[in-house]
C-alpha cells in the first residue's frame, strides 16, 4: 500500500483537515487550491459506522462523479461522469445485498435519494470508502458534494461550495486519492 510520501510530486495531494475547535468544518487542499469545506456533524472518525454522522479518516480513492443535467452543464473532469436520473438512489441498509451501491427507485430497502431538491447533490463525487470490500455497517454514501447554507455539517460527507467543487473536479481523475487527516 502506498503512503502519502510515495505519491509522485507531480500529482497534487487532496488533503482534508478539520479546523481547530470546529470538528464539523475543514479545509480541503489540492495543489494550490485551498477551500473551506463542511464535514460530518460528528467530526471525523477512524472507525466509521453507519449513521454515526462522522467523516471517515483515511485514504480513499475517488471513484466517479454524478451531476444534475437539468441544473448544470456537464462539468469538465477526467473522472467517469454520469448524469443523475430521477430514480437514482444509494443503498444505506447494511442488511441489503446492494449496501453502499447505486440503486434505482423504487427500492425495497433503505436508500438515499440522489435526485434532491435542495441542490446538495447537483454535483457528487463518489469516494471509495467501504466499497472494496464492503463491510456491512461500516458506512455508506460517503461523497464530496455541494455544501449547504453556511457549511452546515453533513451526515459524513465532505461538502464544498459549488464553484469550488467544479474547480476541483476539473482536475480529478481515476487514481486520485482523498486523504482525510486525523
Image (spheres, grey):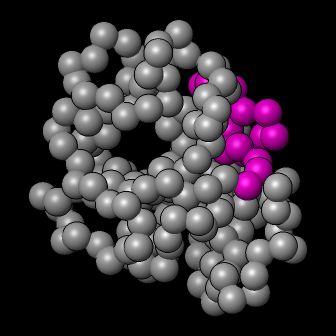
Residue 163 falls left or right of residue 37: left
Where in the figure is residue 91, as x and y percent of width and height? 42, 25
Given residues 104 and 118, the one toward you in this image is: 104
Judge whether residue 91 is colored magenta.
no
Question: Magenta segment range?
Answer: 43-59
Q: Residue at x 58, y 37 (%)?
A: 131
Residue 48: give x, y in percent of width and height: 72, 33
Work out whether residue 7 can be spotted. yes
Kindly identify the residue that appears in the image at 25 percent across and 28 percent down. 104
Q: Nearer the viewer, residue 145 or 131?
A: 131
Across and down, in percent, residue 85 comes to 18, 43
Q: Residue at x 55, y 32 (%)?
A: 140
Q: Is residue 47 magenta?
A: yes
Residue positioned most to the left: 70
From where the camera sits, is residue 161 visible? no
Where residue 103 appears, as percent x and y from the top left, is: 32, 29
Residue at the extreme front: 1
Q: Is residue 42 above or below residue 61?
A: above
Name the magenta segment's main secondary structure. Answer: loop
Drawn side of residue 115 relative to residue 59, left or right: left
**Residue at (55, 58) in percent of width and height:** 62
In the picture, which quadrant includes the N terminus? bottom right
Q: Quadrant of residue 90?
A: top left
Q: Is residue 27 above or below residue 155?
A: below
Judged left or right of residue 170, residue 32 is: right
Q: Quadrant of residue 132?
A: top right
Amino acid at each position: 500500500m502506498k503512503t502519502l510520501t510515495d505519491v509522485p510530486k507531480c500529482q497534487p495531494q487532496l488533503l482534508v483537515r478539520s479546523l481547530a475547535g470546529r470538528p464539523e468544518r475543514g479545509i480541503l487542499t489540492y495543489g494550490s487550491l485551498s477551500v473551506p469545506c463542511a464535514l460530518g456533524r460528528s467530526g471525523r472518525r477512524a472507525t466509521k459506522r453507519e449513521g454515526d454522522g462522522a467523516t471517515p479518516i483515511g485514504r480513499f480513492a475517488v471513484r466517479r462523479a454524478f451531476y444534475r443535467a437539468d441544473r448544470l452543464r456537464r462539468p469538465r473532469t477526467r473522472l467517469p461522469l454520469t448524469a443523475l436520473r430521477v430514480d437514482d438512489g444509494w443503498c444505506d441498509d447494511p442488511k441489503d445485498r446492494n449496501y453502499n451501491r447505486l440503486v434505482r427507485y423504487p427500492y425495497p430497502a433503505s436508500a438515499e435519494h440522489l435526485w434532491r431538491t435542495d441542490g446538495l447533490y447537483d454535483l457528487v463525487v463518489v469516494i471509495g470508502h467501504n466499497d472494496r470490500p464492503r463491510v456491512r455497517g461500516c458506512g455508506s454514501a460517503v461523497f464530496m458534494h455541494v455544501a449547504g447554507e453556511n457549511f452546515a455539517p453533513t451526515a459524513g460527507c465532505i461538502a464544498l461550495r459549488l464553484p469550488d467543487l467544479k474547480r476541483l473536479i476539473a482536475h480529478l481523475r481515476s487514481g486520485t486519492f482523498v486523504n482525510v487527516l486525523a
